[in-house]
Amino acid sequence: MSYREDSSASGQDEPWIQWFCSLKGHEMFCKVERSYIEDGFNLYGLRGSVPNFTDCLDLILDRIGPDESDDSHLTQSACTLYSLIHARYIITAHGLDTMYNKYANKDFGTCPLIQCCGQPVLPLGLRDEMGVDTVKIFCPKCQNVYHPSPIRYRNSYGASINSSSAVDGAAFGTTFAHLFLMTFNNLVPDSLSEESVYVPRVFGFRVHPSARQRSTNLSITINTGNAASASSAAGAAKKPINVSTVPGGEADNGVTMDNYNDDSNNLGDKPVTSSKPTSASMDGKGKKIKRGKSKSEDSGGSSRRKSKNGGDNDESASSRSKRQKRP
């Protein structure tokens, strides 16, 4: 419903401010005192905010009748001007007292959180500029911000911010809710206790906060492992294969698949040599050096030589004794 349709239904004797506050969805607005609007000091800086400032002000103060203000653009501008004046008025002493009565009557609604048990809320604007965002509600118990109920919001959840059916958040501003609680500190409720906080459970067991984090880390680890294996496989494909790594090979001959394939056609021309290590090794000058025997072999050989020499000595001694006995 637009302001033009509502203005046509209003009576000529009804003040404009009363008509505006009685619109559906405008239950959060309070009636600004006429004396406050007539004071030019309170309107400082608002002249450039709306077009036809003087005509809008005359319409709000009933200086011109509804018949003389059939222009819908003028009515829309007057509503915008009244919203800006309203945001300044509710942070004054008289404005806070007026909003106190509405808060006590729960005209602003209650908190939708179950743990708050119907805690009254306060209107709140997230921005002080018109046409940026719609009005929200602030709960002093859970310290959270919510969308108001559709009934108090003129059923305009799907409406755009610039729609005439939406209540602009700048009509209440970012200061009012917190200044109200600072002024009437006896209305500040106790914060939610830890026992009242909802705890998610599965089969009666609490869900640990790191449950989602673990699943996320697991997927990251799997993805990282797959990437590492893929990169290692790609590197192995590019690296030449050494024949010595093939099962059955006993020595590293330094032959790769590159020169192995080249030499495979000439195997008939080249003698086949064994890749097993020999007992001889090469010294620094290219000469062969015979492998030395172990200590056990040396000791065994020396003992056999000693025993053989000992046997020869015995035979020679017996032959000499026989020659001496002959006449």
Image: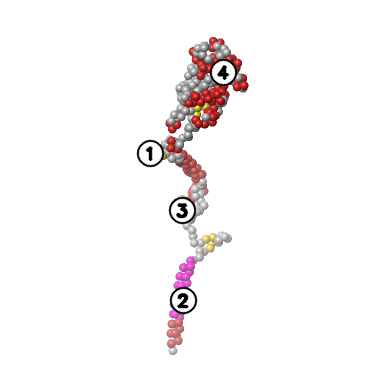
In the rendered structure, which amino acid carries the disc numbered 4?
A: Arg
Q: Classify mark 4: helix, strand or loop.
A: helix
Point 54% across, 31% down: residue: 182
Compared to residue 243, the image places residue 159 above or below, namely above
- Give the numbered dot on residue 62: none
Other residues around mark 4 within 10 Å, as few (<14) / some (14–19) / many (≥20): few
User: Residue 249 — which label?
Assistant: 3
Q: Which one is nearer the viewer's eye here, 252 or 325?
A: 252
Bounds of the magenta span? 294-316
Task: Report which residue position mark 2 lands on.
Answer: 309
Alpha carbon of mark 2 to alpha carbon of mark 1: how far? 96 Å
Residue type highlighted by circle 1: Gly
Q: For marks 4 and 3, give the one nearer the viewer.
A: 4
What secondary structure is marked by label 1?
Answer: loop
Sequence-wise, the earlier of marks 3 and 2 is: 3
Which residue is label 4 attached to? 34
Label 2, residues with CA under 10 Å away: few <14, some 14-19, many ≥20 = few
